[in-house]
Image: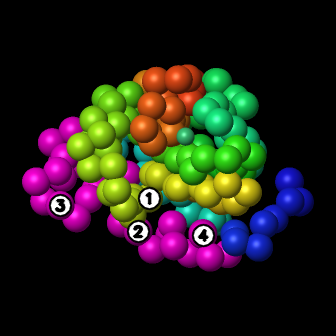
Amino acid sequence: MIFRPLLSAFVMLSVASYGAHPAFAHDDAEHKHEGAAHGATDTDGTPGKPADVKRTVRIEATDNAFNVKQIQVRAGETIKFIISNAGYATHEFAIASRKENEEHREMMRQMPNMVHHDPNVITIEPGETKELLWKFGKDRNVEFSCNIRNHAEQGMHGVFRVMQ
Ligand SMILES: [Cu+2]
């Protein structure tokens, strides 16, 4: 795909500079649950490297939905997601196991002003377009969702079918 937003270089750099663990990591030590959830195996994936991207998937966020419900991927495949927010509300695009996303939503209910610096989540303001690079692991049960307020509950989520 030729489309290339101005932000892409910056986003790729910031994604690449993160550590290898994809789980939601927050500064607050009390709420750090990355280790317990996955141990040493990152079965739902890891942040993607720009050089490994072979496929681009564009997704549009509106209030409150994504225009895609299901995406087929291959285990080990690195995909560049380009997410644009055509709505009036702020949205998130988070890739994680269902369990992690549920835990994350619970955490956001308790701390609604929580700031993210997780490699598996981007926050997209209205009118913005952002990228997330993700390398899928072996886990078949991987979700994408917006964990802001009740958006996921209203249907703002979808599933990756991970082919082995
Ligand atoms: Cu949302």
Q: Which residues are magenta?
A: 9-37
Asked if the residues shown at circle 1 and circle 3 are in contact, with their CB atoms under 8 angstroms apart, the answer is no
Residue under pointer 2: 18
Q: Is residue 161 left or right of residue 140?
A: right
Quarter, ligand 1: top right
C-alpha span from label 1 to label 2? 6 Å
Question: Residue 62 is drawn in which quadrant?
Answer: top right
Asked if the residues shown at circle 1 and circle 2 are in contact, with their CB atoms under 8 angstroms apart, the answer is yes
N-terminal-most mark, 3 or 4: 4
Question: Residue 109 is drawn in which quadrant?
Answer: top left
N-terminal-most mark, 1 or 2: 2
Tell us which disc is closer to us: 1 or 3. Answer: 3
Residue under pointer 3: 28
C-alpha span from label 2 to label 3? 18 Å
The type of colouring in the image is rainbow
The location of residue 160, given as percent across then percent down, is 56, 29
What amino acid is found at the position of numbered circle 3 in the picture?
Asp
Q: Residue at x 32, y 44 (%)?
A: 108
Residue under pointer 1: 119
N-terminal-most mark, 2 or 4: 4
Q: Residue furthest front?
A: 88
Asked if the residues shown at circle 2 and circle 3 are in contact, with their CB atoms under 8 angstroms apart, the answer is no
C-alpha span from label 2 to label 4? 11 Å
N-terminal-most mark, 4 or 1: 4
Q: Mark number for residue 11?
A: 4
